[in-house]
Image: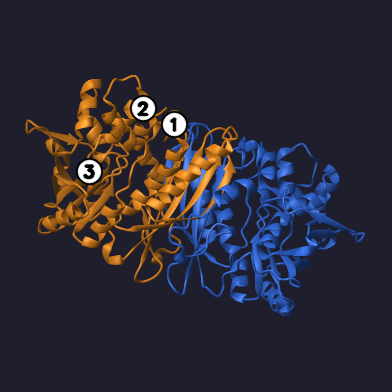
Chain colours: A blue, B orange
Amino acid sequence: MKLSALGEFNLINIMTRDILTNPVEVVMGIGDDAAVLKVSPDQWLLFTTDMLIEEVHFSLNWASFFQVGAKAITVNVSDIAAMGGKAAHAVVSLGLPERLSVENIEELYSGLRKAALDYNINIVGGDVVKSPALLILNVALLGLVEPEHVIFRSGARPGNFIYVTGCLGTSAAGLYLCQHPEVQIPESARGLVSNTFLCPRAQSTAGRLLGESKGVSAMEDISDGLLGELAKICQASKVGCRIKLKDVPVAEEVRLIASRTKNDLFKWALSGGEDFELVFTVAPPDTIKIQEILNRAGVGCHLIGEIVPAAQGMAVELPDSTLLPVSFEGYDHFAYKEKLE
Amino acid sequence: MKLSALGEFNLINIMTRDILTNPVEVVMGIGDDAAVLKVSPDQWLLFTTDMLIEEVHFSLNWASFFQVGAKAITVNVSDIAAMGGKAAHAVVSLGLPERLSVENIEELYSGLRKAALDYNINIVGGDVVKSPALLILNVALLGLVEPEHVIFRSGARPGNFIYVTGCLGTSAAGLYLCQHPEVQIPESARGLVSNTFLCPRAQSTAGRLLGESKGVSAMEDISDGLLGELAKICQASKVGCRIKLKDVPVAEEVRLIASRTKNDLFKWALSGGEDFELVFTVAPPDTIKIQEILNRAGVGCHLIGEIVPAAQGMAVELPDSTLLPVSFEGYDHFAYKEKLE
C-alpha cells in the first residue's frame, strides 16, 4: 500500500503503537499537543516538535526567510500554549540547500531569534546539515507546567461551553491571497490576512492564563482547522459537540475577501489551518471567570458552541437552524498543506 | 556569499550568537554535545537534536528502513552519553515522500522502536509530514544527569591522558564497502564494518559510567572523526594535544580492508566519522580507576595520547616519532557526509 493512499491520521496510528520503555515518567505520550513528562514533582515538562519543509509548509515565493524562521518557533510555542504551559527551551535543526546565501541564513536566524525573544524562550542547541534541494526546519521545544495547571484534550464533558480566542479563517484567506496576488483587495485587508498567514502569533499568554485559571476542561491550538481540532477533543474526551456557525468569529476583512473572490467563507473558518488561536471548553460555573481573565489580558474570546454526549456526534448548526453532521475523519492537515504545492 | 563556500563551523558561528532570553536556567547552550538545563536542583536536563536526510546522511541503496530508523535514535543517544548522562525521552519528526509504502514506514518505525528499547528511552511524540522527494528524520532527545556527573568538553587540562573506547575507522571502512560492493573481502570483515556503519551502537553505558566516575575531565562522542572531536575539546578547553598514531586502535578487519583497497588506514582512523565511540581525558591519578570501571563493564578502552598546553597545538606523532601538526579547522563533518552524494 502506497503512502499517498493514506492520510496522516492513519500514519499516526502506525506511529502510536507502544513505545514507552519506561512509562513511569510519562504522564502523556503521543496523543496531545505536547508530551507531558514527570521530571520533578512540582514542575512537569512539556515536549513537542514540528518539521517545516519548503514547498510543503511554506513557499519562499511569498514568505521571507525571516518569516519562515519565526513561524518555525511559533508553531511549537502554540502547542505548548495549548497544554496551559510556558515555552522555555528549543533546539533547532536546519537542512540548508547550497543555493542559499549566507545572508539568507542570517535572515532565517534573525526570525528564529525574534520569535525566541517574543516568547521568552532560549535556543540552546541545534543541528546544521546540508539539504540537497529544499530548506527544512525542525524545532523541538520544551515547556514547563505545574501539574495542577496542565490542560489535556481529553477533559471535555457534555454541557461544557466551547470557546475560541481571536478570529478564524484569517490565515486561510492569507494563503489564498499569496497564491492569487492579482486579486484586487484593499491593502489593509490584504495586510491583515497576509500577516496572519506569514507571521502568525501563538496565544502563549492566553494559554498560560487558561492553565492557571484551573477552569478549562480541554484545549487545543487551531493549527489544523477548527473542526479538526474539535474532532481531536471529541475523540479524546469521548464526547460530541454542536457548533453554531453564526457564532464562529470571522474578521470583516476575511468576509470581504471571501465575498470578492467567491470563496467559501465557512470552509475557511471551520477548516482553514494555521490560525494558531485556541479552542477550549469550560464548565458552566467557570465561564464568567474565564472570560474575565481573558478580557483583562486583552485577549478576545467567543462562545461558539457546546459539548454534547458522544452519541450525538459532531455537528454544525447552520444559520437556518438545520444541523450539518461532521465526520471525525477528513480533517487531515495534509489536505490543507497540499494546497501549497 | 554562497553557502557552499562555507563550512559547518562558520555556519555554527552564525548560529551561536546570543539567543538566551532567560539564561538563568541554561548551564550550557550551544557549544557542547547537548545543552544542559537546570530544571530541578538534583537532576539536570540534557537536550540534543540531529537531522538525517536521505542521500546526505544515509542512502536507501544500502541501508534498510529499519537501520535508518535505529540510527536516527542512536546518533542522539551518543550525544547524551558524551555528556555523562542517561537518555530518557525522544520526539521524532518524519518527512515522508509519497513513494514510500506503508510497509517501509512500519519498518522504519520498527527500527526507531528497537533502538528506543535498546537504550531504554521513550518516544513520546513527533510530527509526520509529507516530503516532496527525500526521506527526512529528525530526533530530539532529552537526557538526565546529576549536576556532579555531567562532563563538558571544556575540562581537559595539560597532563591529562586521552583515551578512546572501542576501535576507530570501522564505520569509514563500512561506508567504503557499501560504495564499492564489488571489492572482494572475507564476509566476516565485510559484516563487521558494514554493521558498524549501518547499525552503529552508542556507548550509552560507558558514557554513564564515566559520568558517575567523576574522574573524566572532558568527553566527546566520535561522530565527526577523532581529530574533529579532539579539536572541539582542545578549543573549548584552551589546550593542545599529542596523539600517538600507533596507539590509535583499529580493528584487524579494517586494516585488511584498507590494505586490500589501497585506502589510507590512518585517514579512516583519524578522520572517519560515525564510529560513535567516546574520546575522553583523565587526570593521571584517576586513570587506573577509570580503566577498571570500563573493564568491569566489558568496554575496551585505549590510551592514545596526552593533553598539552595550547601553545603546542594539536599534533599526531607518526610511528617514526616525527610530529605532524594538525589544524583545528578542516574537520568539517560536511566533508565526510558529502562522500555519500
Tell me whether marks 1 and 3 sit on the same chain.
yes
Q: Quadrant of residue A207?
A: bottom right
Kindly identify which numbered label has been placed on residue B217.
Answer: none
Sequence-wise, the earlier of marks 1 and 2 is 1
State the residue in front, B94 or B22. B94
Indicate whether B273 appears above or below A151: above
How many other residues sit within 10 Å of disc 3, few (<14), some (14-19) or many (≥20)?
Answer: many
Q: Quadrant of the C terminus of chain B?
A: top left
Q: In the current view of this chain or complex, which residue is farthest to the front? A: B187
How many other residues sit within 10 Å of disc 2, few (<14), some (14-19) or many (≥20)?
Answer: many
Sequence-wise, the earlier of marks 2 and 3 is 3
Q: Secondary structure at mark 1?
A: loop
**Residue B39 in sight:** yes
Residue at numbered disc 2: B178
Q: Amino acid at mark 2?
A: Cys
Q: Amino acid at mark 3?
A: Gly
Q: Residue at x 24, y 38 (%)?
A: B168
Alpha carbon distance from label 1 to label 3: 25 Å
**Labels 1 and 2 touching (C-beta < 8 A):** yes
**Labels 2 and 3 touching (C-beta < 8 A):** no
Q: Position of residue B69 (x, y in %)?
A: 45, 42
Kindly identify which numbered label has been placed on residue B166.
Answer: 3
Q: Position of residue A215 (x, y in %)?
A: 65, 76
Alpha carbon distance from label 1 to label 2: 10 Å
